[in-house]
Amino acid sequence: MSDDDELLPPDLESSPCLQGEKVTFTGILASMTHRQAYDLVVENGGSSSVHVSGHVTMLVVGEEGWPLDEEGKTSVKLEQAVELINAGVPVQILKESDWLRLLGLEHRERDVHRLFTPAMLQQKLDIPVGVVRRWERLGLIEPVQRVYRLPYFDFQEVAAVRRLQEMLKSGIPRDRIEQSLTGLRLLLPSVDRPLAQLEILARDSRVVFRDGNGLVEARTGQRMLDFEPEPTVAQSDSSETASADSAESGLSEAPSTIPLPTFGVVTETTPANWNADEWFDHGCELLGDDEIPEAIEAFRMGLMLCPDDAEIHFYLASALYRKGNVGGAMERYHVAVELDHEYIEAWTQLGCLRFETGDSQAAIEAFDIALTCHSDYPDAVYHKATVLSELGRNDEAVVFWKQYLDFDQDGPWAAAVMERLEAVSAASSELVEHATQSDDDSI
């Protein structure tokens, strides 16, 4: 033993990492429940508290949301912890991921920043796929990675946008939310991103367009003051010159756009001169608001302008299915994969509809095409396992169900998979027990 070793306090290396710490939590934890977190504190030598007091030494901030209350104000626990710090009490404020590293649970950090497909987010957060993709188009969320057309999003970022939208829709003033988030910046630098998202959400709620009579707010139809400057003399002169040139050449001036039938979908809040992207975006918004017939017509308007856009066909298929037109939906999914053979989301949805209409073999073939393009596509893995199980091919289904649990452990689909695995295991045990009993009876 060296001299240095003799100077070490006894049992230092074996001391629990939270020895002497009194820990409490605020906000929603992404990796576990608060109950599980409190149990971990005790297991690691600390003590837990549901309140902040002068005895608390550590406050852990959950990363599935921010520590804001229902009125958009900073949580009471965080405010109390800051007051204690300002009074000289040594309270540590840690993000959930930092706390997990302190406990040596780095492998649980992936639960804090899990990657979800739009379909998985719909199951987990009850956000329609169309809304998720619209948020992406607006720049509210950004995919962490993309496989062909399929985006994978950070669960925490999407949950944060949903929370912001809920607060705004409930009538909480934007200024109050912004003030609370700004106050969190010193403690949680990652708040910069939610502040940017808040700006986009607030701006999106005031989208305006110009019609023949001035500016109109898209969502309400309310007219706004229009400060657009009048055309300059130079602009007027150039317009008159162009008209004169056309007249002298004997050519009539061609219209800038070809008029399209509007099928009643154009109102005073939807300008008829939108391009395909604008009609698509409007359709996604209508789809998210369950205005299905209007969404269908908006997507059709987009396809009149851009008939080879696979994504518009895909979302038109989704809208047709929600209206009950399964045949029409399947046809549009077929068009989407014809235009883009590696559109794995369309192949997966096509597989689901094939199974729903009784063609199980075609369903499995569609899932296999998606998995050939992307072998770790969670949605296709889950749905193929479900179809295999319905066909009685449980041994094959188990392989895919276990593969799905590599991507997701606590979402609704994960819960369904675990139930299925338990049922298969129980059934197998009964078969073994029955076989054993039969062998005993035959002796």
Image (cartoon, rainbow, N blue to C red):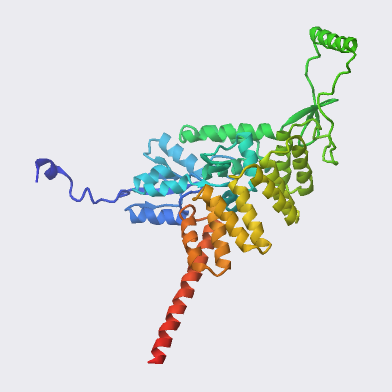
- Quarter of image, res 365: bottom right
- Quarter of image, res 325: bottom right
Q: Residue at x 61, y 59 (%)?
A: 363
Q: Residue at x 41, y 40 (%)?
A: 93
Q: Residue at x 48, y 46 (%)?
A: 114
136 sits left or right of 66 in the view: right
Task: Give coordinates of residue 402: x percent, y percent.
Answer: 46, 60
Quarter occupied by the C terminus? bottom left
Task: Give coordinates of residue 273: x percent, y percent.
Answer: 79, 30
290 sits left or right of 51 in the view: right
Q: Is residue 16 above or below residue 167?
A: below
Residue 379 visible in the displayed image: no
Task: Tell me how many marks there are.
Answer: 0
- Quarter of image, res 301: top right
229 sits left or right of 51 in the view: right
Task: Give coordinates of residue 406: x percent, y percent.
Answer: 45, 54
Task: Give coordinates of residue 108: x percent, y percent.
Answer: 41, 49
Residue 18 visible in the displayed image: yes
Q: Is residue 8 above or below residue 442?
A: above
216 sits left or right of 15 in the view: right
Q: Is residue 399 above or below residue 128?
A: below
Toward the viewer: 375 or 85? 375
Toward the viewer: 410 or 433? 433
